[in-house]
Image (cartoon, rainbow, N blue to C red):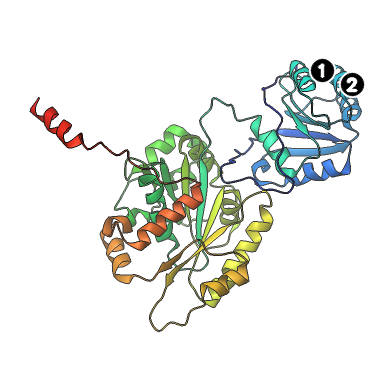
Amino acid sequence: MISYSRQTPEQQPDGQPPSTEDHIAPAPRVSVQAFCETVETAAAVQSAGEDRRLGKAHLKIQMGGMAAAIEAYRSAPTPNVIILETEGRNDILLGLDQLATVCDAGTRVIVIGRINDVTLYRELVRRGVSDYVIAPVTAIDVVRAVCNLFSAPEAKAVGRIIAVVGAKGGVGSSTVAHNVAWAIARDLALDSVVADLDLAFGTAGLDYNQDPPQGIADAVFSPDRVDTAFIDRLLSKCTDHLSLLAAPATLDRVYDFGADAFDAIFDTLRTTMPCIVLDVPHQWSGWTKRALIAADDILIVAAPDLANLRNTKNIYDLLKASRPNDRAPLYCLNQVGIPKRPEIPASEFAKAIESQPIATIPFEPQMFGSAANNGQMIAEISANHRTTEMFLQIAQRLTGRGETKKPKGSFLSPLIEKLRAKK
């Protein structure tokens, strides 16, 4: 018997990446086999297999549609997911009845068809089909259909990962990451964690005035122990809504990692935290590239000079090409307006990158220096400063959320409070 989960057909406009609110959780390590009838659908499925959210899935594509699937599974076990493209109503129902006789229990089936009819859909559900997608399909349609099979409606929403990286060393990307995370937690009231990935020289512990005995190094060097309980013990509480996975910032060992070294940590954080902010160091390695590509949203922090422009352009173009079904990376300019320093205007940056910066943060050495030395955020130093508002705007743009307003009391509130105090 083919297991199924009830879903209604939906269609994504051609060529449109998902919106900020359309958050698709990555699929686990599963095997997926597609049997296509048209070259267009096969190309869409092939493109979906290259999407970051199906990075752990093993995808195989064959032509021949329903008939090829039935023949293939007469002598071979079925995978976790079968994608079937078919043309007519009778072909679908008859083919599914035959497929059920050779299909292993637990296999999930996604049908791609051209008939938009609710009666047909009900018949498909009755036969155990997990999802029915109306052709023509795009890559993101296939990604959504596969990933949704493993996201139970009653389960907690999978956490959103935001990666912040500097276009060049010393541009203040860590400061931006920490202040944006603070705004997400405090102003948007979203439970968040900052993961400091610069294990040798990370500054998150200093910026949040924390000195935890354990942190991210304990997890990355003990991958077999990583689970929810283990990660919870490593987190340092900064505020009610903000936690820190701190870097040791010591040089007693060398931090050389494989490309997938942080995967288990990120996967575990996703299951427990609505928002994960990655403070990615300025280096180019297998694991930093993987962390950036796998993130849900990316913020590049750059200073207004030529080297930053070149590096921002390179990072932006690579990530945009590697994530065709995602929103393009965002970038901001930091340390703008240093006296006597020639700078490239924001308009020139925008022209070269073909995208506007989401913020231009001014050079404020007194305020930023005081915050860094005191282990405070900019909002704690100057709550009403324009830079504090910029960090909130960046937080809203990255999360797709508006500011959480505190409910206002009535004009009788002070009187009621006094009466309660007398009691």
Residue 211 screen position, x and y as percent = 30, 50
Q: Name which of mark 1 and mark 2 comes first in the sequence.
A: 2
Q: x, y percentage for residue 283?
A: 53, 63
Q: Position of residue 50 (x, y in %)?
A: 72, 47
Which quadrant of the rendered structure holds the N terminus? top right
Could you tell me the amino acid type at mark 1?
Ala
Position of residue 156 in the picture relative to residue 387 (left or right): right
Q: Residue furthest left?
A: 422
Instruction: Give the crowd class for mark 2: few <14, some 14-19, many >=20 residues within 10 Å.
Output: few
**108 lies above or below 401:** above
Mark 2 = which residue? 90
The answer to whether 356 is drawn above or below residue 110 in the figure is below
Kindly indicate the quadrant of the structure image that contains residue 339. bottom left
Amino acid type at mark 2: Asn
Answer with left or right where residue 409 lies relative to residue 286. Answer: left
The image quadrant where one finds the C terminus is: top left
Report the front residue among 221 and 376: 376
Q: CA distance from mark 1 to mark 2?
A: 16 Å
Residue position marked by numbered label 1 in the rendering: 100
- Could you tell whether 258 is left or right of 188 in the image? right
Q: Position of residue 292 (x, y in %)?
A: 57, 54
